[in-house]
């Protein structure tokens, strides 16, 4: 006779690691349709997640403090998920175990990893406190008001942004706008690789962005820089004095993945198929900035992280029920709206580019709607 007090089947545990763009849709799905018979956990390093689309607008001063943040606590509560605030610093994929920086370990039956990428700051490390890496984004957001305070009333205040991706360009233009009213003759410089900025975007978009940067006196320099105590050095020997340096140099895979046992690409990103399942472990999904697709090239961007979320949600459920997995198939062209800091935006869609104030209003509407959708009001919490 089975003893009813001890269930013969131990409850399975599904763990989400990372509470960012890719996992928001999963929390949403679980709130709508709870997963019965399994324990669900969210392990994430911060209670709040900054919605990246609004960060440049916030930097430019168009949003109140906190308006770009999503509070994960009520979302987890609504989804019936146990929230653990902790930083993963190890994974043993063969033993189904995560290790947190606190020393605790978290075991799982099914894992979804979306902890986002890191920024490689090693060439700029000598800058010390002058260096602001864009990740962790919450730390970056916390430090920006101090930069503004420092720039206020100064003549010739100099900010260097290293990284010519969409984030670097948007931050340079947002910073130029923010400094305009508080300091005289501020210098904003964007340093990008020899390949130029916004690689992967069409020529029409790059031309519009170049004109925008020129018109706003944001100087663009090319080459891999290294930092010194108070400057960055270009390979040409040119020295650029910097009060602060923002590192927006793109995503680097977390180092701890190396020892995880997961199949990784040469740069250390997790290899997944179109179903977002690890190619080496069939109980580990991964999405967002820490993955490389083995079937096609998919850019590491918030757009793809967000869009892969609903597929992750369906597939976690399907895996538990032994059903067929869905695929995340990106659209052939991705629409990007790049904020120019002055309440305008540049639309980039395939070979097509457009700029104007109405595009900023559209972006603002989309972004606010996204944050609102993932915000649990006090009334809903009751
Ligand atoms: C300033 C800026 C502006 C950007 N603007 C755009 C844009 O306009 N459009 C666009 O498409 N993309 C944009 N991006 C890129 C976009 O932010 C990323 O592609 C996207 O955030 C990736 O989503 P993700 O879910 O992989 O990771 P994230 O959204 O970064 O989420 C990672 C989550 O994991 C948590 N975490 C991190 N490390 C650990 C750990 N070790 N253990 C536990 N938890 C951890 C974090 O706290 C966070 O909750 C921008 C990026 C920046 C920096």
Image: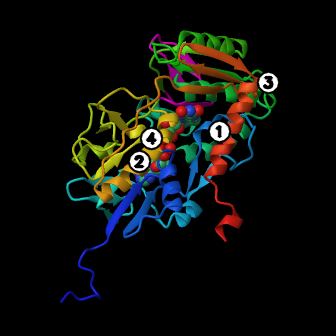
Earlier-in-chain disc, 2 versus 3: 3
> Vertical placement of 215 versus 293: above or below?
above
Q: Mark 3 points at which residue?
A: 184
Q: Residues within 10 Å of mark 4 (few under 14, many from 20)?
A: many
Mark 3 and mark 4: Cα distance apart in space: 44 Å
Earlier-in-chain disc, 3 versus 4: 3
Q: Name the residue under label 1.
A: 54
Residue at 30%, 29% in the rendered image: 295
> Quarter holding the C terminus?
bottom right
Residue at disc 1, secondary structure:
helix
Q: Residues within 10 Å of mark 3 (few under 14, many from 20)?
A: some
Mark 1 and mark 2: Cα distance apart in space: 24 Å
Numbered disc in front, either 2 or 3: 2
> Vertical placement of 264 versus 312: above or below?
above
Q: Tell me the tag on residue 276.
A: none
Residue at the extreme front? 323
Mark 1 and mark 3: Cα distance apart in space: 26 Å
Residue at disc 2, secondary structure:
helix
Earlier-in-chain disc, 1 versus 4: 1
The answer to whether mark 1 and mark 2 are in CB contact below 8 A is no
Task: Provide residue 109's location: percent of width, then percent of height.
Answer: 28, 61
Q: Tell me the tag on residue 312.
A: 2
Residue at disc 4, secondary structure:
helix
The answer to whether mark 1 and mark 4 are in CB contact below 8 A is no
Residue at 42%, 44% in the rendered image: 311
Q: Can residue 242 be seen in this view?
A: no
Q: Quadrant of residue 5?
A: bottom left
Magenta-highlighted residues: 228-249
Numbered disc in front, either 1 or 4: 4
Numbered disc in front, either 1 or 3: 1
Left/right placement of residue 299 relative to residue 334 reads: left
């Amino acid at each position: 006779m089975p003893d009813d007090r001890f269930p013969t089947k131990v409850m399975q545990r599904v763990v989400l690691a990372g509470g960012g763009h890719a996992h928001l849709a999963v929390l949403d799905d679980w709130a709508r349709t709870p997963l019965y018979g399994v324990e669900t956990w969210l392990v994430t390093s911060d209670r709040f997640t900054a919605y990246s689309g609004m960060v440049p607008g916030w930097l430019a001063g168009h949003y109140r403090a906190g308006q770009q943040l999503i509070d994960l606590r009520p979302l987890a509560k609504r989804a019936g998920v146990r929230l653990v605030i902790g930083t993963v610093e190890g994974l043993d994929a063969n033993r189904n175990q995560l290790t947190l920086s606190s020393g605790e370990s978290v075991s799982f039956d099914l894992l979804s990893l979306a902890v986002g990428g890191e920024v490689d700051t090693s060439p700029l490390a000598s800058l010390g406190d002058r260096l602001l890496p864009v990740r962790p984004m919450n730390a970056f957001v916390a430090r920006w008001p101090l930069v503004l305070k420092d720039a206020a009333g100064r003549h010739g205040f100099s900010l260097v942004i290293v990284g010519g991706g969409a984030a670097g360009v948007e931050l340079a233009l947002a910073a130029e706008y923010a400094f305009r009213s508080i300091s005289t003759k501020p210098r904003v410089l964007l340093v990008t690789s020899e390949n130029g900025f916004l690689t992967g975007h069409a020529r029409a978009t790059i031309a519009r962005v170049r004109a925008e940067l020129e018109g706003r006196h944001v100087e663009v320099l090319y080459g891999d820089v290294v930092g010194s105590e108070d400057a960055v050095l270009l390979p040409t020997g040119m020295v650029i004095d910097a009060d602060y340096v923002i590192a927006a140099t793109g995503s680097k895979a977390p180092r701890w993945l190396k020892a995880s046992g997961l199949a990784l690409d040469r740069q250390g990103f997790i290899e997944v198929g179109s179903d977002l399942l690890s190619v080496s472990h069939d109980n580990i999904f991964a999405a967002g900035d820490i993955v490389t697709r083995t079937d096609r090239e998919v850019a590491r961007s918030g757009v793809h992280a967000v869009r892969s979320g609903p597929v992750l949600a369906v597939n976690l459920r399907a895996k538990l029920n032994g059903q067929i997995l869905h695929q995340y198939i990106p659209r052939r062209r991705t629409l990007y709206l790049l904020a120019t800091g002055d309440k305008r935006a540049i639309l980039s869609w395939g070979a097509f580019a457009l700029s104007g104030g109405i595009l900023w209003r559209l972006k603002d509407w989309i972004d606010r709607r996204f944050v609102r959708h993932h915000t649990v009001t006090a009334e809903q919490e009751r």
